[in-house]
Amino acid sequence: MAVSKKIKKMMESASWIRKMFEQGARLKELHGPDKVCDFSLGNPNIEPPLSFTEALKEVAGREPGQHGYMPNAGYPHVRSKVAEFLCREQKIKITGDHLVMTCGAGGAMNVALKAILDPGDRVLVNLPYFVEYRFYVDNHGGILDITPCREDMDIDVELMEARITDRTAAVIVNSPNNPSGRVYPEETIRVLVEMLEHRSREIGRPIYLISDEPYRKIVYDGIEVPSIFPLYKNSIIISSYSKDLSIPGERIGWLAVNPEADDADELVGGVILANRILGFVNAPALMQHIVARLQGECVDIEEYKRKRDKLCAILEEAGYKFLKPEGAFYLFPRAPGGDDVAFVNRLQKELILTVPGSGFGMPGYFRIAYCVDDAVIERSREGFKRAIEAVG
């Protein structure tokens, strides 16, 4: 057997996102790229801001020696720059000593879970959730524990509390959420942290709140993402520059440990070790130098808002049911007819590529990534109409 039984099983249940992306490539080859409407992958189509290009040119022309090894946590001056920005964003004092530069948010999530999980520990997440969480948790001997969300896609704290056991090590919150675009309001987060504080005392161990925030800056209509650090001490924030700077292929992100967390210094040490022994070693050197100069910068969010509004108008006119996303760049409508896989297959007949909600733990919905050219959105109009009409 070429691969282990475990990996073979994982391959069979691997990401729907990638499956649909690959199907899109086949359809483009058959019909031509200009005929296919590919909404499958959350790959930002907006170019990085000009400041990124300028920083790249300047950093690349520096003196020799800038591509060598550095501390596993990243360059100290880069960590300090990110920490300075976090002080303003989180409204809490944090230094570079509690921050680790990582290979994207995915790398950050893996080193966090490696640092805190013992075999058999459980990690809670609410629906809908980013499908890779299941694999990430399993990578480090943990078990992903999934709880339903409310009708409005908000966290159901009461249901989540009922799932907590003495093996619960962490709760992952992803806001703005992929795939729903929901931003969890501060009131919900406050109820959640109050519950976590109470249950942590009861089970005799801290339950970490891991806030996964790669879409934090991509929000609309004046909505703000609540700051986690001032609300809950045993918290970890994970983010990347993939979405707000449109550089997902550069794999650069960070992880911050709340300086007020229990045994915060030991936790940071564990994260740094995990970064090394998982094979990441350190975040890409060139990108660290660049993002240090670009703290707080972002692509033009108004472009994504315009795309959101254009797609919402098309779907609303056709009769789809959905909640207007508050952030990120995804729509998560109900699947007409109720069978998300069947409906996504029906959309493929219209050369429209989307992802079944089953891939995010929520059958009956489907995800549309609208980080695409306006022409793709407009071209999909008649296909979305015909698909919903076909299922009545």
Image (cartoon, rainbow, N blue to C red):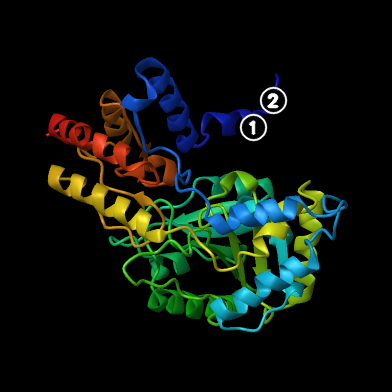
Residue 304 location, quadrant: bottom left
Determine whether 375 is above or below 258 in the image. above
Report the side of 82 relative to 42 (left or right): right
71 and 15: which is toward the camera: 71
Looking at the rendering, in which quadrant would you find the N terminus?
top right
Residue 363 % position (x, y): 34, 43
Q: CA distance from mark 1 to mark 2?
A: 6 Å
Q: Is residue 196 above or below residue 25?
A: below
Q: Is residue 296 left or right of residue 70?
A: left
305 left or right, relative to 166:
left
Residue type, numbered disc 2: Val
Judge whether residue 148 can be spotted in this image.
Answer: yes
Residue on which disc 2 sits: 3
Residue at (36% x, 71% y) in the render? 223
For the residues labelled 1 and 2, say whether their Cβ atoms are less than 8 Å apart.
yes
- Left or right position of 356 against 198: left
Residue 7's label in the rendered image is 1
How many other residues sit within 10 Å of disc 2, few (<14), some (14-19) or many (≥20)?
A: few
> Where 28 sits versus 128, above or below?
above
Element type at mark 1: helix
The spot of residue 68 in percent (x, y) is 86, 51
Q: Secondary structure at mark 2?
A: loop
**Label 1 Cα neighbours within 10 Å, binned few <14 / some 14-19 / many ≥20:** few
Residue 21 percent across, percent down from the top left: 45, 31
Residue 310 position (above or below residue 210): above
